[in-house]
Amino acid sequence: MIPVILSGGSGTRLWPLSRRHYPKQFLPLVSSHTMIQETLLRLTGLAGLQAPIAVCNEDHRFMMAEQLRQIDVNPSAIILEPLGRNTAPAVALAALRASSEDDVLLVLPADHVIENIQVFQQAVNQAKVLAEQGFLVTFGIVPTEPETGYGYIKRSTEAVEAAYKVASFVEKPNLETAKSYLDSGDYYWNSGMFAFTAGSFLKELEKFNPDMLEKCQLALKSAKVDMDFVRLDKEIFASCPSDSIDYAVMEKTAKAVVIPMDAAWNDVGSWSALWDVTAKDSSGNAIMGDVFTVNTHNSFIHAHSKLVTVVGLDNVIVVETDDAVMIAAKDKVQDVKDIVDQLKAQSRSEADIHRKAYRPWGHYDLVDTGERHQTKRIVVKPGAKLSLQKHHHRAEHWVVVKGTALITKGDEQVLISENESTYIPLGVVHCLENPGVIPLEIVEVQSGSYLGEDDIIRFNDQYGRV
C-alpha cells in the first residue's frame, strides 16, 4: 500500500498563521509535529506500507522534503505541480507513478486531524481488502452534528463487507437538510480520503475523463526528475482539466463504496475547528504562547512573538504573528478568507508570505524595512549554501552574529567569523556558505532603489532554483 499525500491547499481560513507560501499543512497546529508529519506518523504500524508519494505545489518543495526528512520518511517521489488542478489530476499522477497497477493507493489530504488512530487504521485495513477486490473506497465520517460546511456521502442499503455501496455524493447542505441527514443515519461527512488500486482508478478515469488521463500521462512523461522531485511540464499540465476525485470519478463509477469511520476526525478548516481539537483551560480557552486573560471564556488565543492580553471577551479568536493581528468572533471565522481577498486585491504581501521566510538553505526574518533599506536576520544551516548571484538594484552589508561564513565576492573567497563583516557592492557576483557544524547567523542590511526578492540573478544554485 502506497500512501499518497495531497498537499495542494492554501488554508486561507487559518490566516494569518497559514499563508499561500506557508500553508496550514506545514504548520504544527495541534502537536509538536506539522500536519503533514502527523498524517504520515498515524500510519505507523500498518503492515505492507511502501514509501509514500507526495503531491505538492512547486513553491513548497523544499518545505515538503525537509519535513519528511525530519521524521525519517524517504518518499519514492515528490510530484511538483506548477499550478493547481484539483485532486483528480494529482491522484492520477500518483497512480501513474506507482510501480504496479496492483499497488493500493491510500489517498490522504495532508491537513486533517484524526484522534482515534486505532479506529482509523482498522478502517484502512478494511479498505485495503476492498481495494484489492477492485472497489474504489472512500471513508465516510460518522456525523456528530448537522454540519453545513461539509459535503456528504449517502450510502445505499447494499452492504459490501465492512462498507456500503455509495448511493450518491451531495453538496454542502443548509441547516434543515443537514439535520435530516443526521436523523436518517444514511449520510456521512465526505472526508476526502480514498483507497483503490492504481489500475482501478486509472481505468475508471479513462472511462469518464480520458482527456485528463492523457494530459497527466503527457505531463509525467515530459517531467524532469531532480533527486526526489518530479517536475511537471507547466504548459502541458496547464492544459489538464481541473476537477476533484468526486466529480471526475467517484460520482460516476459503479465501483464506489464507503466505509463508515468514527475516529474523531476534523479537517481543521477554520479557527473554530482548531479550537475544537485543542486542549482548553478551565474557562474553555485554547491558549498558545505568552497570553494572559481576565474574565474570558471559550476562546482561541495564539501569541507568536508578543504578550497578548484579553479582557472580558467570550467566543473570540485572537491570533498574533510577527506582522499581523487577527481578531474574530468565533462564529464568523469562515469570513477570514474575505480579509485575505482584500489583502490580495491591494497586493499586500501579508496574504502570501510571513515575515519569516523559509528557504532550502535555512530561513530569514525581515526585521525592518524602509523606503531604500531593509534589514534581515539570516540563518544558514550547517553545510548549506545560497546561490551564486548578483543584484542590479541593491548593495548588501553582512555582519556575522554566530558561526563562520565562507563568502564569495567576485574572484575573492574569504572566511569571516563572529563580529566581523563584509560589504557586497551593487552588481558584484557573490555567494554565502556555512562551512561549519553549527547554524550560521548573520544580519544583512540592504540598501538601494529596489529591494524586492525578484532582484536576484542566479548563476549557480545547488537546489535547482531559477
Image (cartoon, rainbow, N blue to C red):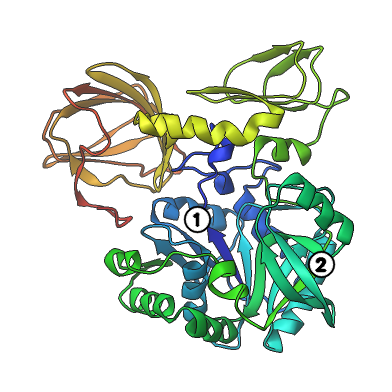
Q: Residues within 10 Å of mark 1 (few under 14, many from 20)?
A: many
Residue 94, position in %: x, y?
50, 73
Question: Is residue 195 toward the left or the right of residue 393 in the image?
Answer: right
Residue 36, position in %: x, y?
60, 54
The answer, for residue 70, to whether it is visible in the render is yes
Choose between 186 and 47: the one closer to the eye.
186
Question: Is residue 391 toward the left or the right of residue 36 in the image?
Answer: left
Instruction: Give the residue displayed 49% in from the left and 65% down from the top.
Output: 243
For residue 329, the mark is none
Q: Secondary structure at mark 1?
A: loop
Instruction: Give the residue displayed 82% in from the left and 70% down from the top.
Output: 122
Instruction: Give the residue displayed 47% in from the left and 80% down from the top.
Output: 96
Amino acid under disc 1:
Gly
Q: Residues within 10 Å of mark 2 (few under 14, many from 20)?
A: many
For residue 8, the mark is 1
The residue that mark 2 highlights is 260
Considering every residue shown, the one lying at the far front of the view is: 176
In three-dimensional space, the C-alpha distance between marks 2 and 1, rounded to whole angstroms, equals 26 Å
The answer, for residue 378, to whether it is visible in the render is no
Q: Nearer the viewer, mark 2 or mark 1?
A: 2
Amino acid under disc 2:
Pro
Residue 458 drawn above or below residue 211: above
Question: Is residue 76 toward the left or the right of residue 141 in the image?
Answer: left
